[in-house]
Image: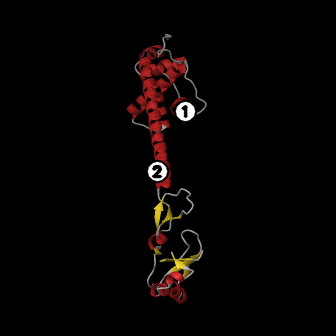
């Protein structure tokens, strides 16, 4: 066997190729698939055509060792190798070695290409998974960062904003956002009104809960509060003399 790079093969590799081709031919010629059937066919065939005796158990061990890759692989003797090569249409093992080198090189290349393709597919799959995860994570943080999940009081109502830690910022409440309004200088008492009195100033709102600035709990407007801070100031020309004024 020559020693040129790409053409030098271990004997075991050549034997592996030989056994694989042997059983491929036996399967094709005999139409049999079970191990015992192939082994029996080969044993009978070599005896009938070449008067060479190899028992069924030997072929069974070759099949298990080289085809099924089970432990305890038994290598054929040189005489058996020559005979098996003759069955495959070669003069002997040396002739088989010379002719099969190119096929082994092709098989190696096919395997390398296949391995590279599988590796590439795995890399692409992993890349896609990572890409989807990164995109999902990025979308989550972007939406979380830019989404308006808070609200802040602006003049007489709440407006949505992106949470940023402002002093009067509070967590978004869609109901409060929709219903809470300050009633500037009310002229009459509505069915449901709430108020806050801080620093001798009274402010009125359309919804209950916390005061949008000082966070005090708003109180419902009673008849007394309505009379004192809404009706009397409206009807009296002396409303500006009250100590408590409506802002």
Q: Which residue is mark 1?
A: 69
Please state if 108 lies on the left or on the right of 77 as rendered: left
Please state if 177 lies on the left or on the right of 73 as rendered: left
Q: Secondary structure at mark 2?
A: helix
Q: Residue at x 44, y 38 (%)?
A: 124
Is residue 79 or residue 203 the one in the foreground? 203
Give the mark nearer the N terminus: 1 vs 2. Answer: 1
Looking at the rendered image, the disc whose residue lies closer to the viewer, 1 or 2, is 2
Mark 2 crowdedness (10 Å alpha carbons): few <14, some 14-19, many ≥20: few
Q: Secondary structure at mark 1?
A: loop
Give percent across and percent down for residue 242. Answer: 55, 82
Visible in this render: residue 163? yes
Labels 1 & 2 near each other (Cβ < 8 A): no
Figure label count: 2
Q: Quadrant of residue 196?
A: bottom right
Is residue 14 or residue 242 the one in the foreground? 242
> Which label number is shown at residue 38?
none
Is residue 119 or residue 184 the one in the foreground? 184
Give percent across and percent down for residue 125. Answer: 45, 41
Give percent across and percent down for residue 43. Answer: 48, 28
What distance separates the C-alpha of mark 1 from that of mark 2?
50 Å
Mark 1 crowdedness (10 Å alpha carbons): few <14, some 14-19, many ≥20: few
Is residue 184 or residue 64 the one in the foreground? 184
Q: Which residue is mark 2?
A: 139
Q: Residue at x 51, y 22 (%)?
A: 13
What sort of colour scheme is used for the picture? secondary structure
Residue 79 higher or lower than 212, as above or below: above
Give percent across and percent down for residue 213. Answer: 55, 68
Please state if 23 lies on the left or on the right of 202 as rendered: left
Q: Residue at x 48, y 51 (%)?
A: 142
Visible in this render: residue 51? no
């Amino acid at each position: 066997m020559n020693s040129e790079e790409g053409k030098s093969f271990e004997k075991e590799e050549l034997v592996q190729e030989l056994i694989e081709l042997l059983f491929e031919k036996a399967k094709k010629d005999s139409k049999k698939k079970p191990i015992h059937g192939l082994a029996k066919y080969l044993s009978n065939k070599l005896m009938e055509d070449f008067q060479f005796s190899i028992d069924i158990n030997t072929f069974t061990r070759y099949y298990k060792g080289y085809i099924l890759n089970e432990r305890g692989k038994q290598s054929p003797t040189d005489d058996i190798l020559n005979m098996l090569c003759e069955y495959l249409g070669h003069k002997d093992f040396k002739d088989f070695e010379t002719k099969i080198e190119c096929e082994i090189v092709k098989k190696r290349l096919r395997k390398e290409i296949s391995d590279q393709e599988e590796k590439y597919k795995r890399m692409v799959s992993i890349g896609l998974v990572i890409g989807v995860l990164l995109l999902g994570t990025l979308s989550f943080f972007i939406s979380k960062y830019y989404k308006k999940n808070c609200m802040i009081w602006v003049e007489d109502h709440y407006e949505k904003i992106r949470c940023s830690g402002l002093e009067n910022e509070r967590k978004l409440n869609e109901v409060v956002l929709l219903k809470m309004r300050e009633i500037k200088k009310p002229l009459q008492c509505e069915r449901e009104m709430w108020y806050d009195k801080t620093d001798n100033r009274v402010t009125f709102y359309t919804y209950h809960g916390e005061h949008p600035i000082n966070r005090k709990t708003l109180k419902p407007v009673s008849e007394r509060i309505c009379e004192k801070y809404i009706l009397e100031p409206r009807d009296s020309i002396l409303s500006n003399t009250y100590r408590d004024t409506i802002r």
